[in-house]
Image (spheres, rainbow, N blue to C red):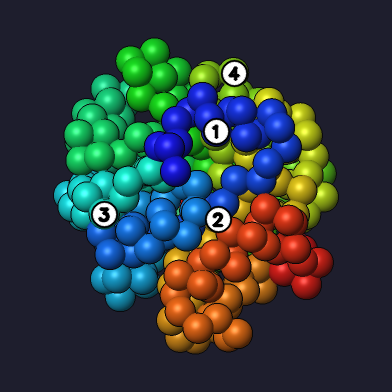
Amino acid sequence: RKPLTLHRLREMHAAGEKIAMLTCYDASFARVLDDAGVDCLLVGDSLGMVLQGLGSTVPVTLQDMAYHTACVARGNRSAWVVGDLPFGSYQESKEQALRSATVLMQAGAHMVKLEGGGWTAETVRFLVQRGIPVCGHLGLTPQSVHALGGYRIQGRDEDSAALLKQHARELQDAGASMLVLELLPAALGAEVTAALQIPVIGIGAGVQCSGQVLVLHDMLGLTSGRLPRFVRNFMPDSDSIEAAVRRYVGAVKEQSFPGPEHGY
Ligand code: KIV
Ligand code: NA
């Protein structure tokens, strides 16, 4: 497979091909996911919970993110690598965001992701003008879990839905080339996706998004405790991890995942 580029992702999106993304934190999984046809590897700050055993993503540091981004980049050959800017690494100023994004890009990321709407548009524009592809992240933004009052579905009332749509347009206008939507009513996920030109990757945001993302350990059944409704474990009926990941990619491409039972 030829390495994915922003240009190729835009072509896929224009052709209506769904984009399959999974989180990935190390070289071994990067190789497996790349071989299994995953389009985008997200080095998510969810590694705080999944790898480090933390209660939230808030304590994850830029050094943590750079280390895991470098690990993923070494194992990957052709997937598009997105690195999460962690909490506190981009909120202070657009200059701070550029310094932090530089660390992740030099560790091997092709794109950085940051959370939030409104104030982030200026930061996104600043990074994009300086040659850094940016992915936005709206809806449930886990770095703000303490401000949001828990991991709750977002955009339920008319006002918050309208604000989210406005933030999505502002991120696109600022030059973001991708947007993650987390934990929204499926109808709102569909509406935002239809209103934007850039690919919208959903997690608990319905099947109408331009692509899907899951936390790797959730879709491999490695996560203990109660899982959110949007998760599907692809390991039962698969005889290897690579087979499970292939089934995930296939299900995203043919839009059999997420099903209505995974949505809100
Ligand atoms: O950190 C992460 O895993 C994420 C995805 C859930 C979108 O940001
Ligand atoms: Na994240």
Viewed as shown, does residue 169 lie left or right of 142? Answer: right
Name the N-terminal-most of marks 1 and 4: 1
Rate crowding at label 2 as few (under 14), some (14 to 19) or many (20 or more) other CA atoms within 10 Å: many
Amino acid on which disc 4 is placed: Asp
Using the image, determine if residue 75 lies above or below residue 53.
above
Name the N-terminal-most of marks 4 and 3: 3
Q: Mark 3 points at which residue?
A: 75
Q: Name the residue under label 1.
A: 9
Badge number at residue 173: 4
The residue lying at 57 percent from left, 76 percent from top is: 234
The label nearer to you, 3 versus 2, is 3
Q: Nearer the viewer, residue 217 or 226?
A: 217
In terms of secondary structure, where does tag 3 sit? helix
Q: Distance between the residues labelled 4 and 2?
A: 23 Å
State the quadrant of the C terminus.
bottom right
Label 2 near ligand 1 (CB < 8 Å): yes
Rate crowding at label 3 as few (under 14), some (14 to 19) or many (20 or more) other CA atoms within 10 Å: some
The residue lying at 69 percent from left, 29 percent from top is: 14
